[in-house]
Image: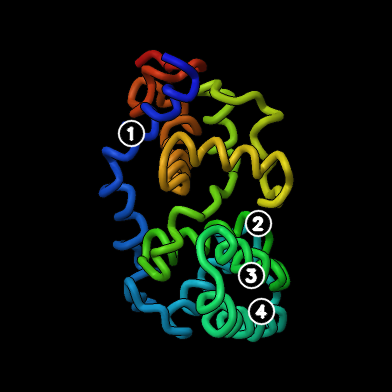
Amino acid sequence: MGKYDILKEAIRIVLEHKEEMDKCVFESIHYKALGIKRGDQSRENLKKWFILTTGPGWRGGPPPPYEERKVMVKEFDDWYDEVVIKILPNYDGQEAMDRIYRKFMQIKWIGPKIAGVYLEDIIYKFGVWSHLVDYLYLPIDRHVHEIMFKKLKVFSEDEVPAIGESFFTRRNQRFQAILDSIHKPRIEFDYFWVVGSTFCAYHLCDFCWIKELCKDRRPIPI
């Protein structure tokens, strides 16, 4: 089995658990309390998830100060208008997606990781602008990073983009292109985050879904 075949098999196995993984979003108290509606591309619907995404627990630290968040919400409105009025009617495919990313990352406090997570949620999970799902970039966190090079050993550490690295560096563009050639939509590789946080973080190797493919198993005797 070639190294890319290993990655293809790993994502196939992980996606067998897609329904239970998605419950973490759709049955969360935040999702229900905010009243998010799937497929609703209205400004207010998308703004609710934006406010949650930029809050505590998502960025690895405290949220921006209250006054800063008011500015961010105003900048979100500007982004939304740009997308709906200028980008979607005039561009398609990867060019449209890239313009949406670049404009979104102009909002203060928003970097590639949060941009990737937010756009993944609204486009892939919530079905808003779903025609762009194949053009989403995979955001990199430490779990995805380690599974790609340390656990599955598909890439060298230098080939996997750093956490928070721009989507538009040469390295990240090459990496994203390889993922796109292995599995569509490539955003589904983000489910490796669940594997890392559920199994790898607690050394639960014997229970991991992709244990047979892992090159760095460290089971704890029980």
Question: How many tags in the picture?
Answer: 4
The amino acid sitting under disc 2 is Pro
Q: Residue at x 32, y 40 (%)?
A: 15
Please state which of the two labelled residues, at mark 4 or mark 3, is closer to the viewer: 3
Q: Earlier in the sequence, mark 2 or mark 3?
A: 3
Q: Earlier in the sequence, mark 4 or mark 1?
A: 1
The amino acid sitting under disc 4 is Met
**Image vertical order of residue 73 relative to residue 12, above or below:** below
Report the front residue among 79 and 57: 79
Q: Earlier in the sequence, mark 2 or mark 1?
A: 1
Q: Measure the alpha-carbon separation of dots 4 and 2.
A: 16 Å
Q: Earlier in the sequence, mark 4 or mark 2?
A: 4
Task: Name the residue tied to disc 2.
Answer: 112
Q: Measure the alpha-carbon separation of dots 4 and 3.
A: 11 Å
Q: Earlier in the sequence, mark 3 or mark 1?
A: 1
Task: Name the residue tied to disc 1.
Answer: 12
Q: Classify mark 1: helix, strand or loop.
A: helix
Across and down, in percent, residue 216 comes to 51, 17
